[in-house]
Structure formats: C-alpha cells, structure tokens
Amino acid sequence: MEAGNIDTEAVRLEALRQYQILDTEPEEAYNNLARLAAFICDTPISLVIFIDENRLWFKAKVGLDVSEMPRSVGLSDLCQEQGQVVVISDTLADEKLANNPVVTGYPYIRFYAGVPLITPKGDILGTLCAIDQVPRQLSQKQVEAFVGLSRLVIDQLELRRYVAEVSQVTEKLMAHEQSANTQSEALRESEERWQLALHGNNDGIWDWNFKTNEVFFSTRWKEMLGYKDYEVSNRWDEWTKRIHPDERDRVLQAFQDHFAKKTPFYVCEYRVQCEDGSYKWILDRGQALWDALGDIVRMVGSYTDITDVYDELRLRKRADEELKRQNLRSQLFSEITLKIRESLQIDEILQTTVTEVQKLLQADRVLIFRLETDGSGTVVQEAVLPGWPVILGKNIFDPCFKEEYIERYRQGRVSAIEDIEAAHIQICHRKFLQQFAVRANLVVPILVRDAIWGLLLAHQCAAPRQWNQFETDLLQQLANQIGIALSQAQLLEKETQQTQELTRSNAELEQFAYVASHDLQEPLRMVTSYLQLLERRYKNKLDANADQFITYAVDGASRMQTLINDLLNYSRVSTRAQPFVPVDCSAVLEQVLANLQVAIADSRAIVTYDTLPELIADTTQLIQVFQNLIANAIKFCRHQQPRIEIGVGSRGAEEQGSNQFKIQNLKFKIKELLPNAQCPMPNQNEYLFWVRDNGIGLESQYAERIFIIFQRLHGRDKYPGTGIGLAICKKIIERHGGRIWVESKPGQGSTFYFTIPDRAKLNRQNVN
C-alpha cells in the first residue's frame, strides 16, 4: 500500500473510532434502517456494515447469521474504492467477483447493492448493503431511496456523537461545579463544537431543556418545515401540536418509553405539520441525559426529512396491495369459473360469489337480487355480518325503481353511493335503503344475453364508504361470470328437457312399433293363409292375369310378414333386452354358423375366424349382430364364392403377452385386407371385432346411411331384404356401449368393425 493510501486509511479508522460504534450492542434504530433497506430493494438480506482494519463488522443485519466477516472476503471495499453506490445484478457474470468466497460460499451472493456511509467530513466508515441469492435489478427510484437511507445511518451516528459530547460536558459541569472557570471553558468549547455541527449537518437539530421546558430548534429544522424564526415557539407543548393527530399518542408514548429507560434511544417516524398546513414524514431521534439523582436534565435530538423515502415505500406498498387484490380477484374468478365448469349448480355459484366477495371487500352485506319485469324482485343469495338485517328470500319492491332505471341497468349502468344521507337521491329511495340499514352501496347489473336478470350489490351499513375502481371492476367482472353461468344453465336446462322429450318420444315410438307389429301379425297371417289357399286351388284354372295377381299378392304378404318380424326385432332391442352375462363369443359364432348352415352351403361360402374372447353381454343380441353381418356378407357377394373373415383385437391382451387377440396382428390384418383403411385401434378397455367379405362393396358416402332403418342401396329385385338388419346391429352395439362402422370400396369388399367394452376389466379397475 502506498504511503498516501496508508495515511488516508489511518485517518478513516481514526474517524470511525471517534464514533465509538464498533462492538456495541444492537440498537433498534439501526435495525429499522436495515429492515427499510431490505424492503426498498426487495431482498432477503441487508446489512449496516462498519469497515474496521481487518474485518467487516455488522451493526445491524437482516437475514444473516454471522456478526462479522474478514475484510478480505467481502464486497464492501467496492463502495470504498468507488466512493459511490455500487449495484451488481449478477456476481457470477463478473470474472473478478465470481470466485469470491462470499459468492461461492455462504451467504452465496448473486445480487449486491451497496452505498458508502460517508461522514460530513468525507470519511467512508462502512456501507449500507442489500444482498440476494438470485440475480435481480433495481429501479432508479429504488436506488435513490437506498442512497437516501444511507444518509439516515450517518445521521444516526452524528446524533450518537452529539449526545455523547453533551453527556460528557454535562458530567464535567456537575463534577466541577465549584470551579467557575472550568465551567465557563467547558461550555465555550461545547458551544463551539455544537455550532460547527449545526452548520455542517443537513438535519434539523433540537435541544430540550427539562428545567425550563424550552426547546431549541436549529435553523435547518425551521427551514425543513418552512417556518421563520419568529413563527416557531420554543415551548414543548407548542411543538407537540405540530405532530399529526393520528400519530401524536404514539410519539408521546415513544418519549415515555425512553424516559423510563425502556429504550436506549428515542426513535420515531411520524408526520409533522409544515407552515403551509401540509405534512412531512420525518425520522426523529434523540437521547435524554440524566443527572446523578436519575432526573432528566436535557434531551438532544435531530430531524431528518424522509418524505421521499416514505413516498417510495408507500408506492411500493400500494403496488404490493394492488397485486394482492389482483391475486385474490383472480383466485375468486378461478373458483367461480371452476364451479361453472364442474356443475353449473347456480345456487352454489351464487352462494360462493356473495360469500367470497363479502370477505374480499370486507363489506357488511353482499347480495344477489333477482329482478322481475315490474321492478320488484327477490334476494336469492346473501352474505351479511352479524348485527345487520337479513333480507335473504324477501320479496322487495322499491317504489322509486321505475322502468327507466331497469333500462339503464340493462345498458350496463353501475351505481356507487358513498353516503345515502348526503347523496342526491330521491327521498323514497333513501327511505327504502334505510330500512335495511344501508349507508353506502355499490350496484352492478347481471345480464343474460343482453337481458337484465338481476343485480349484484355490496352494502356498507356501519358507516359511509368510498368505493374504489378495483371494487367496481371486481363486481362487474363477477356479474359477467354469473351472467355466463346463468346463460349456460338455461341452455343446459333446455337441452335436458329436449333430451328427456326425445327419450320419451323414442320410447313411445318403440312401444308403438312393437304393439303395431305385434297386432298386425294375426290378420296378416290370415291374409297370407287365404292367399296361399287361393294360389293352390285356382292356379292354372283362371286366366293368366289372375295367376299373376295372386302371385303378386302372395309375395307382398310374404314381404309384409318379413318386414313386421324385422320391425318387431328392432323394437325388442330395447323392450325385450336381456341382462348382461358372461358370454363365450366363440360359442355365439358357432350358433350363428349353425343358423346360417343352409345359406352357407348353397353359396359355398368359406368362413374363417379367430378364437373369440369371453364378454359380459346379451347373448341373444350378439347372435343377432354376427348373424346379420355374416348373412349380409353372403348375400352381397354377387356370383362369386363368398370369403368371410371374422377377427378380433385387444390392446390389453398385447400388454399381457397373450398369443390371442394381439393388436400387432390386428394392424397387419387390417392393412392386408384394406390397404387404404386407417387401422382403427381399440382403446385400453375394449375389444375390436371385424367381419370382412369379398363382396360388391359400397361408396364411402353411403357408409353411414346403411345403418339407418329402412335405408336400402339396391332394389329388392337384385338383393332382397327390409333395410332393418344393420340398424338393429347399430342399436345393439350402442346398447353395449360400443360403436360400429364400415370401411369399403366398390368391387373390393367391405369390412364391418364394431367395438364392445371389456366390462370384466373395467370392473377389476373399479375394485382396485
């Protein structure tokens, strides 16, 4: 170290020692300043550091466990070297700092902000610093407030020195009362130092003489508040009148605590009145002096204008409060929106709304009013504090609430009354509100598709209240959410009614089809029998036209009989359904092939099939499905030999490693059978069956039409049938919880797919 630097360091250390601050006990004043530093910079760690010869000693600390560190490992020398505020957003981004022990080890500094603590004579005693373990940035206002706070640390040191000097002088005076010369000399020296300090300090100084109850105020003290010398009384009671009424008791209590020696120093922050009537925030500090008998003889203190710091703190506090309100509002919106999506239970949604809004706004009452066309209405939900009238369920009519007001609310009017006693409202409306103890209210409309449904209201009953924009926006947005919920609930109710009506209508149609077809059976059998009798008895005995007419009649009656039987089968899918039981599909297929034995033999059809699984299903209906699909495959093969494949696949079987029903085989088979198919895949809990033929196929636009009852793609002269078979299959599969569809191309055959849930597997999952 160069000689000049050594001399400067020696002067600095001597100045530090004069303040007698090192290794002293913690003091609330410095602790408060450290807390303010952490708050301003929004960091978890803040320190008031004094730089000794070989160490960094922490007079006050927030978020740190140690009381000092070696000077060689800290970052405070940066402030001393630069003589100004230092802000390092990320220490790891600085090569010189990245390997510093306080960066790589405890307290793992990533962000550092430091301000040098500079005395009025220019000596740097230490730093005020804020630290975080993650990178961050400071705004210009935060930096300015942080620098201003560092001056308060120095002011506190200066006050400590003033008090120590005055205490020493007082002790000398009391110890040497007999020596007038000594007394005079001590007073003169003290006064010279005192006046020098007053001129060199930017704070306001006050000196309270307890014997005379007079207070001396420095010129700076008066300038700070805008007073002239003659405008300031030196009486103690006149001084206390300038303290803001809301804080006067707190300030006087702080004095009393110090007088009772409950605190080593008097420190208080409060507002004091300026000459123009406005108020400034000041930091007031002082210390009393006691004589040998324990009586207070004097108290010395200083004023520091902290209005700018407080303005910054208030702005941040308001921003924090606004953020909290926004979070609460978002949380409330989420809860209500979630309830809307979960249940659309309007009563539950409305109850949640009034309860949560009442808590959030801390209103005396929040209610939802269902409005009728004549202006009357009913309170359908309410959250009210104890002690105020309960109006839930009451039918209410406001004589002043006319049609014109309803129209205004329909157009989005919001009403906010701070005090109904002073508001310019009709007398009848004021009396109406008074009967419910309403002193202030906020009203927003609830609209459902541009129509007025009701009102959302917040009441203050205990006292007037000024409603702010946040509260107004909150109620408006919630009213919008309620309107959406009501609209959706109405649509759901309408849809439910339509579904119920459709279900009832379908049930009636099915019953009608069953009854009609059943009742037609007997007369149709009689008609058919007599026609067949005519055909046998008079065939070739009448003219050719008569034989043809009889043939037509017999054929029509036969087709009518088939149609009625098919219609009866269709209606029985619902009316005569059997319970689901374990069914061996392989046994079902054997029964179907036995039923179709004649058709298979006549067409020389080749039917191949996989081993089929066991399902929980309706046995009779499964037989109908397979029989209809295989019969269709035989019928629509034109003049070639029918080739029919029946297969099944299951995703679960593959997971179990079974050789049966493997999904991979299923994919290859589908690709082989239908190269353009999209390889439909069963889900985890169902089987996918298919019936593939080499028949005539069909155009893709008819793939859905063929499952509609009575729909036919060909004339009866080419392919007989009633057009009900596939409709029956679809109805059966849907009853089992599955789906059915077809993949086909003209001339390339068709593959009918259908799925059936594996209910045994689902039951096992539910048990687990």
Image (cartoon, rainbow, N blue to C red):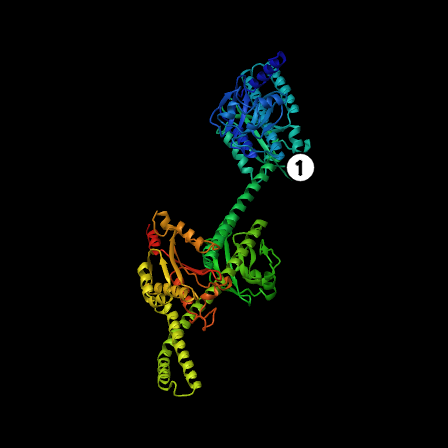
Q: Is residue 241 visible?
A: no
Tell whether 173 sits left or right of 711: right
Tell whether 401 sits left or right of 552: right
Question: Which of 266/65 is in front?
Answer: 65
Instruction: Identify the residue shown where x is 54% and y is 38%.
Output: 249
Residue 633 found in image quarter: bottom left
Instruction: Identify the residue shown where x is 65% and y is 22%.
Output: 195
Tell whether 610 sits left or right of 433: left
Residue 545, image x, y percentages: 44, 85
In what quadrant of the picture does the N terminus appear? top right
Residue 431 found in image quarter: bottom right
Residue 21, image x, y percentages: 53, 21
Instruction: Look at mark 1 in the image and give the residue it sits on.
Output: 275
Residue 599, image x, y percentages: 36, 67
Vertical side of 16 occupied by 545: above or below = below
Question: Which of 604/491 is in front?
Answer: 604
Vertical side of 648 occupied by 126: above or below = above
**Amino acid of disc 1:** Glu
Name the element at disc 1: loop
Residue 210, image x, y percentages: 56, 28
